[in-house]
Amino acid sequence: MYEFQEFENGAALADALTVEVAGALAHTIRLHGKAALALSGGKTPVRFLEALSRYRMPWNDVVVTLVDERWVPETHERSNAGLARRHLLKGPLSNIEFVPLYRPVPTPEEAVAEVNRVIADLPLPFAAVVLGMGEDGHTASFYPGGDNLAAANSPDCKAQVMAMNADGAGEPRITLTLPLLLAADEILLHIEGAEKRAAFEKAVAGDDVLEMPVRSLLKSEKLVKVLWCP
Ligand SMILES: O=C(O)[C@H](O)[C@@H](O)[C@H](O)[C@H](O)COP(=O)(O)O
């Protein structure tokens, strides 16, 4: 299930999303001493990441990772880890614990076992996961037609991360799996613009998860907080 929040503009959405994420982290830190956060890459999160980087909280009690990664080195312009370092992990957040998903091996399949172990060692469940969505209805790296989509997007998946190869994904990917995302205390979906609003409306109007994988979250028992602005 989901709740949909509309914001006047990207700045207002970024501030609200920052408060939402910080609140989830602070709550988990109060309960457990440490909190884990998983962030998406792509273009949409930049303003939010910049706002979060200015937020004052006990960041030393937080570990940040990614919802997914393109299989490129951090120095590559398409790296989600590189995006996080440029827009979030700077200033007071320069030295917080960050767990990238890319490893310097040719394919994600060769790194999956090691990355699984690293993610399993995080203070799970995630206090918050921040998802994006493509106009094709993908989220994380759950791409329509993805070679491991059925497995990674299954509520019964036992792996923490899986490799994903799909025509629309650009590079080979590694992605957190659905159970890990659904187990998060706060599941946030950040989308902007008319095209993604239309894609969201199409997603909630249908049921075929393989057609629009974001449905596996929106149709789940867990609350997904959707934040959208024009
Ligand atoms: O690595 C990625 O691409 C993301 O994790 C992906 O799931 C992203 O959230 C959507 O593709 C939206 O991307 P944009 O914000 O660039 O439209």
Image (cartoon, grey):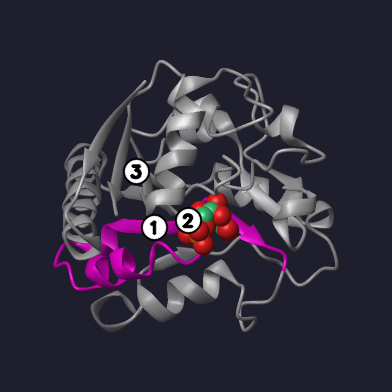
Would you say the residues marked 2 and 1 are in contact, meaning their CB atoms lie under 8 Å apart?
no
The structure residue drawn at horizontal position 38% and vertical position 22%, both measured from the top left corner, is 222
Mark 3 lies on residue: 128
The stretch in magenta equals 42-71
Q: Is residue 165 above or below residue 126?
A: below
Give the SS element for disc 3: strand
- Disc 2 residue: CB within 8 Å of ligand 1: yes
Give the SS element for disc 1: strand
Q: Amino acid at mark 2?
A: Ser
Give the SS element for disc 2: loop
The structure residue drawn at horizontal position 22% and vertical position 46%, both measured from the top left corner, is 29
Q: Is residue 123 visible?
A: no
Mark 1 lies on residue: 63
Crowd rating for badge 1 (residues with CA inside 10 Å; few <14, some 14–19, many 20+): some
Which residue is nearer to you in this view: 210 or 55? 210
Q: Position of residue 125 (x, y in %)?
A: 41, 35
Q: Amino acid at mark 3?
A: Ala
Q: Position of residue 196 (x, y in %)?
A: 45, 47
Spatial distance from mark 3 to mark 2, Cα to Cα?
A: 11 Å
Asked if residue 43 is among those painted magenta in the image, a careful observer would answer: yes
Dot 2 or dot 1, earlier in sequence: 2
Q: Is residue 70 above or below residue 141?
A: below
Quadrant in the picture for the N terminus: top left
Spatial distance from mark 3 to mark 1, Cα to Cα?
A: 11 Å
Crowd rating for badge 2 (residues with CA inside 10 Å; few <14, some 14–19, many 20+): many
The mark found on residue 40 in the picture is: 2
The structure residue drawn at horizontal position 28% and vertical position 57%, both measured from the top left corner, is 61
Dot 3 or dot 2, earlier in sequence: 2
Q: Amino acid at mark 1?
A: Val
Q: Quadrant of residue 27?
A: top left
Q: Nearer the viewer, mark 3 or mark 1?
A: 3
